[in-house]
Amino acid sequence: MSLEAIKQISAAEDEARQAVLRAQQKARESVKEVEIAGKEAIAAMITRAESEVAHLKRTADQKAADQAIELASTTANRQATLRARAEGRIDRAAMLIVERIVNV
């Protein structure tokens, strides 16, 4: 083998090593870029999820407040109806009690 052939082989090996080093460097940079993009995507998803949870909580709280008001109103109406019935019957009940006491 001539000296020229050895130099060419050596140069080719050096070039191959450099190509491998460049490829490794490019791979590391790609990994970093993907990690950054992934972290940004996760942060965006977390922000979106937190916003949605806050919205759902506000909606649920409002719905619960509306239902509580409706329930209180319904309960007050029922109470008034029962009170009116009871007041209408109190005179009759008093009369029955008096009759039983007198007839004893």
Image: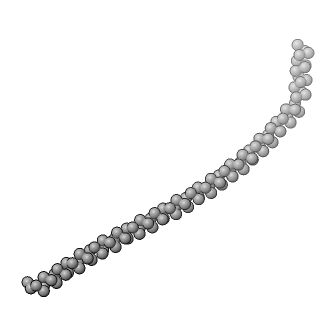
60 over 95 or under it: above or below: below
- Percent position (x, y) of residue 37? 45, 67
Q: Residue furthest top?
A: 104
Q: Is residue 35 left or right of residue 13?
A: right
User: Which is more toward the observer, 49 or 92?
Assistant: 49
- Percent position (x, y) of residue 28? 34, 69
Residue shown at 13% from the left, 85% from the top: 5
User: Which is more toward the observer, 30 or 52?
Assistant: 30
Q: Is residue 47 left or right of residue 77?
A: left
Residue shown at 75% from the left, 47% from the top: 70
102 over 72 or under it: above or below: above
Residue shown at 87% from the left, 32% from the top: 87
Residue shown at 89% from the left, 24% from the top: 94
Count of numbered tags: 0
Q: Pick the quarter of the image with the N terminus.
A: bottom left
Quarter of the image for residue 17 reads: bottom left
Q: Pick the quarter of the image with the C terminus.
A: top right
Quarter of the image for residue 33 reads: bottom left
- Percent position (x, y) of residue 90? 88, 28
Quarter of the image for residue 12 reads: bottom left
User: Which is more toward the observer, 24 or 47?
Assistant: 24
81 over 104 or under it: above or below: below
Q: Residue furthest left?
A: 1
